[in-house]
Amino acid sequence: MHKNLILFALVSGLLACGEKRDELTPYIQTLQGLESHSQQLMRYQKYLTTEGMTSQAHDVEQVMQNLLDELEKVELEDKRLRALHNAMKRAIKAAMRKLVEPDFPTFVPNAQKSIGRLEDEFTKIYGNLELMWQRAGKTEPFPLKWEAVE
């Protein structure tokens, strides 16, 4: 009886290990919860191109830092998801390195370039996530898009 219990536990453990848990869906949901940061950056991009509104984008670095902080909390086991996730974090860090203080004369063009680069990188990453979504057989439309909500 005791040997059967041990064998059952061992087989159950092996079967549980063989099953791959879906990390994609919860990860996409996490990113959806962070969309307010990307939407804020897209609003700032609009402010930075509108005369007299550039000062409203003064905390662009803080918005990027908040997004990075939230991404730092995410832990992933899937190596492809982790690679895309790390690419997002690297893109934010690179964009933040280009920023200068809001009272510098080059603040507006630097912030515009930084947000533009982030948009390009996140659009590529979201494209890869969408491919993973389709390959996983998800029937719902892919929910992420880097764009400002009006």
Image (tube, rainbow, N blue to C red):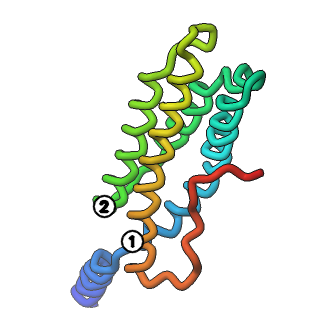
Above-or-below relation of 1 to 122 = below
Above or below 84: residue 42: above
Residue 11 horizontal/vertical position (percent): 26, 85
Give whichever of 80, 23 is nearer the camera.
80
Q: Which mark is residue 132?
A: 1
Q: Position of residue 113 (x, y in %)?
A: 49, 31
Q: Residue 107 in the image: x percent, y percent?
A: 56, 17
Residue at coordinates 55% horizontally, 31% vertically from top-left?
A: 112
* CB-based contact (under 8 Å), mark 1 and mark 2: yes
Residue 23 visible here: yes
Question: Which residue is located at x 58 percent, y 80 percent?
Answer: 140
State whether residue 2 appears in this view: no
Callout 2: 10 Å neighbours few (<14), some, many (20+)? few
Q: Amino acid at mark 2?
A: Arg
Q: CA distance from mark 1 to mark 2?
A: 9 Å
Residue where numbered disc 2 is placed:
80
